[in-house]
Amino acid sequence: MASSVISSSPFVCKSSKDLGLSSFPKSSQISVNRCQKKSISRKIVSVMAPQRSSSTTGSVKTGMTMTEKILAKASEKSQVVPGDNIWVNVDVLMTHDVCGPGAFGIFKREFGEKAKVWDPEKIVVIPDHYIFTTDKRANRNVDIMREHCREQNIKYFYDITDLGDFRANPDYKGVCHVALAQEGHCRPGEVLLGTDSHTCTAGAFGQFATGIGNTDAGFVLGTGKILLKVPPTMRFILDGEMPSYLQAKDLILQIIGEISVAGATYKTMEFSGTTIESLTMEERMTLCNMVVEAGGKNGVIPPDATTFNYVENRTSVPFEPVYSDGNASFVADYRFDVSKLEPVVAKPHSPDNRALARECKDVKIDRVYIGSCTGGKTEDFVAAAKLFHASGKKVKVPTFLVPATQKVWMDVYALPVPGSGGKTCAQIFEEAGCDTPTSPSCGACLGGPADTYARLNEPQVCVSTTNRNFPGRMGHKEGQIYLASPYTAAASALTGHVTDPREFLQ
């Protein structure tokens, strides 16, 4: 087997070990065997699988990965291989208030003003990005979406009309990627596309899910099909017992830091192993959510009882799970011993600028933000509340809480936090001096209009549970964003500097 190494020139490595870490050397590579060239301090980080080759006899089929199987079925083919360009039948198309008007505009331009969409029950429209604002152009986007949905009789349009009280809008959900799952639109074995790069979140359910542009979405609206190139698959095997102070956000930041923001460009990132099997659905969603930050086309996790229980409680639509064959080919295998990992952050201004949280203890911060499709789910707030309660302290910097959906907001006020004596997240947040949980939406994750709640309007330093920390991402172009887990974000709020959550968690 050929070895894949990080190096400026090729050289031979003796062997590879599981990728785990208790501390980083300065090169930011994690514990693996040293290479034979002693003058070079590079280390092996993956092992290449044999390259796929098509059967020459036609009687023996090459094994397929999960993604290849899903795309083969969706293209009505018995076999596909990486690099194939295929027409794929789409199961669900999602769009939101930012991209929806453009997508429908392209649809009408290309198919005609009187044209009808291919299937009004397979299109999901979710206003979520720029909602609670007085910006007239942002508000107009929602109005345009409403007009299109009425005209096309779109079944799943989660509308909002009363911006003064989101609870007065029973159809309004919140952040599209979390709402898609909660409303039963994510199902194993299906193809889900969305006009948002983080549509890959749904890969947690064992489906092919990826973001597309408005032009492609306009074509899908009219035909229900899309032309895709089959991506090769990278496999990430995570084993070991998950330490109590780690969360899925730590795992994906660890991986992105290892392979870089270009390390999975137009590739599938498939996650497996005993650690993955132990994760809840919400934690799996966090993991898949950020594969695009490594350039990934999609992320995917083999469905299991955890998946089936979640899905079957939310939809009666039948689904057909698929799994990678034992002889499937992967372009790279990465193995991690999760029990050896520590809490990490991504420093400004890139998701792969990884560092241990404890190494950043001298970084003074101005605020903390807990929210988004990545870190605004129920379990994210429960985790933050658990740490606040364990500390018994009050926050030292403004701490903003933005539930992803209406359901999450209700959970924050209703669900008791384990070990708190029956207190809810909301009660604990109030005791800790946090801001009152606000209306569910994408909030300041994408910056938004100037009056967006918790937007960075000054060049401040923020620890955030969001997914990107590029300049200007949360508002001010000189703002500095440290991406972190809800545990690390909460710990940092209590101290006023980037903090390892182990200071408060046993």
Image (tube, rainbow, N blue to C red):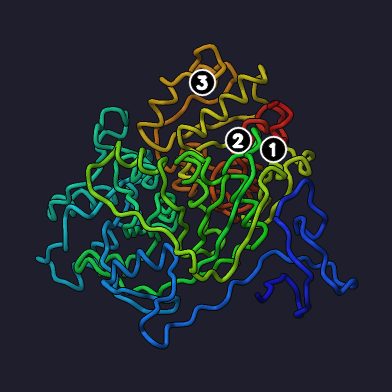
> What amino acid type should be assigned to the residue bearing mark 1?
Ile
- Residue at coordinates 57% horizontally, 43% vertically from top-left? 248
Residue 487: x percent and y percent?
A: 62, 34
Question: In the rendered image, which quarter is residue 18 located in?
Answer: bottom right
Residue 55 visible to an observer of this rendering: yes
Residue 346: x percent and y percent?
A: 66, 50
Per the image, the residue denoted by label 1 is: 365
| Label 2 neighbour load within 10 Å: few <14, some 14-19, many 20+ | many
Residue 207: x percent and y percent?
A: 37, 56
Per the image, the residue denoted by label 3 is: 417
Per the image, the residue denoted by label 2 is: 368
Q: Alpha-carbon distance for marks 1 and 2?
A: 8 Å
> What amino acid type should be assigned to the residue bearing mark 3?
Val
Q: Nearer the viewer, residue 61 or 260?
A: 61
- SS at mark 1 in the image: loop
Q: Nearer the viewer, residue 426 or 181?
A: 181
**Count of number-bearing discs:** 3
Residue 350 visible to an observer of this rendering: no
Q: Alpha-carbon distance for marks 3 and 1?
A: 27 Å
Furthest toward the bottom, the residue is: 56
Residue 237: x percent and y percent?
A: 59, 55
Dot 3 or dot 1: first in sequence order is 1
Q: Alpha-carbon distance for marks 2 and 3?
A: 21 Å
Q: Which mark is residue 266?
A: none
Furthest toward the front, the residue is: 59
> What amino acid type should be assigned to the residue bearing mark 2?
Val
- SS at mark 3 in the image: loop
The C terminus appears in which quarter of the rendering?
top right
- Residue at coordinates 27% horizontally, 58% vertically from top-left? 101
